[in-house]
Image (cartoon, rainbow, N blue to C red):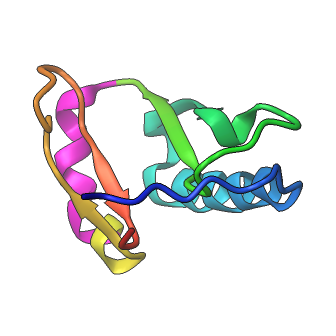
Amino acid sequence: MRRVKVKSYDEQWVSNFEDEAKTLHEIFGPEIIEIHHIGSTSVNGLKAKPIIDIMPIVREINRIDEFNTKMISIGYEPKGENGITGRRFFQKGVE
């Protein structure tokens, strides 16, 4: 059985997102249009699993695979479409 750890809201989640978004902007450059902090850690005051969910909006989804090596170098695992056609999914860290 998988255990889910839920924690009280942590104001650090906002700066964790901002730091990661900055790094992603550096890697993808002008390919990124905007980056959103999504999921429960983005809701002020809400208890959540301490996992920062990030959704970048990109110019051309088909170019994103070109960045896999750089994403691996900062700890991400590229998972391709991961079951949803037309997206790219990356996971960082081990739960």
Q: Quadrant of residue 47?
A: top right
User: Which residues lie in the magenta part?
Assistant: 60-70
The percent position of residue 78, horizontal first and vertical second, equals 21, 57
Q: Is 10 on the left-hand or right-hand side of 17?
A: right
Asked whether residue 60 is in view, the answer is: yes
Quarter in which the C terminus is drawn: bottom left
Q: Main secondary structure of the magenta part?
A: helix
Q: In the depicted view, which residue is nearer to us: 68 or 84?
A: 84
Q: Quadrant of residue 61?
A: top left
Q: Where in the figure is residue 59, as x and y percent of width and height?
A: 39, 24
Q: Based on the picture, tell me whether residue 82 belongs to the magenta stretch.
A: no
Residue visible at 77% across and 31% down?
43
Residue 66 belongs to the span the image colors magenta: yes
Residue 74 or residue 51, whichever sits in front = 51
Going 58% across and 51% down the picture, which residue do you hit?
A: 49
Q: Is residue 44 left or right of residue 62?
A: right
Q: For the point 17% across and 21% down, which residue is it?
A: 86
Of 44 and 78, which appears nearest the observer? 44
